[in-house]
Amino acid sequence: MRFAHTNIVSSDWKRLAEFYINVFECKIIPPVRKQSGDWLEIGTGLEDAKLEGAHLLLPGYEENGPTLEIYQYEVIEKQEAIAPNKRGFGHIAFEVENVDSILEQIIHNGGQAFGSITRKIVDGVGELTFVYARDPDGNLIEVQHWKK
């Protein structure tokens, strides 16, 4: 058994993929997916389901590593951005060398800061530097660095 992917549904999959490529050094794993048909309707439970998107290889993994799957359905339901304390999937996290620099890149590439950069000594583990931010679609991202 192994972890396969995490999916983000976007209103503009190409823009969101470009964000994760530019900020977090993800790489597209071809082919671009264009999917529809009875099998997709049955599997998703959505009538007339059609989607397009791509899988992005996450940084730090070889070619068969887990991916970030970014899809755009032909019909997308609107929703409010979630807060960090809402039930369910909350955020994705990236461990980086420089939290300040990555937060700047997030903002430069269409995302936004959500919290403020914070440092905390965690006994027995080390010093954590982290911040929450949002990607261009409003999804929460944790950017963290551990100093041992």
Image: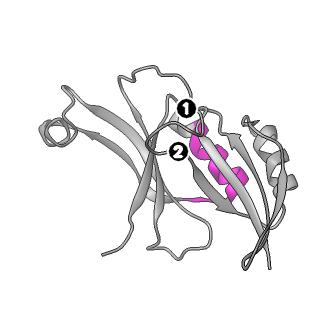
The vertical placement of 31 against 50, above or below, is: below
Give the distance between the C-alpha atoms of the residues marked 1 and 2, in whole angstroms.
Answer: 8 Å
The residue shown at (71%, 45%) is: 132
Contact (Cβ within 8 Å) of mark 1 with mark 2? yes
Q: Going from the N terminus, do you reach mark 1 or mark 2 first?
A: 1
Which label number is shown at residue 9? none
Element marked by disc 1: loop
Task: Tell me which residue sits at (81%, 39%) in the image.
Answer: 108
Does any portion of residue 25 appear in the rendered image? Answer: no
Amino acid identity at mark 2: Gly
Question: Which element is circle 2 on?
Answer: loop
Which residues make up the magenta segment?
A: 15-27
Identity of the residue furthest to the top in this view = 78
Q: Please, which residue is most extreme toward the front here?
A: 123
Q: Quadrant of residue 101?
A: bottom right
Q: Is residue 56 above or below residue 126?
A: above
Secondary structure, magenta segment, majority class: helix
Q: How many marks?
A: 2
Judged left or right of residue 35, residue 121 is right
User: Is 53 left or right of 50, judged from the image as shown?
Assistant: right
> Where does the image place residue 46, in percent across and percent down from the top left?
21, 30
Tell me where residue 93 appears, x and y as whole percent: 62, 56
Q: Residues within 10 Å of mark 1 (few under 14, many from 20)?
A: some
Location of mark 1 (residue): 82
The quadrant in which residue 40 appears is: top left
Q: Which residue is located at x 76 percent, y 44 percent?
A: 106
Label 2, on which residue?
90
Asked if the stretch drawn in magenta spans residue 26, the answer is: yes
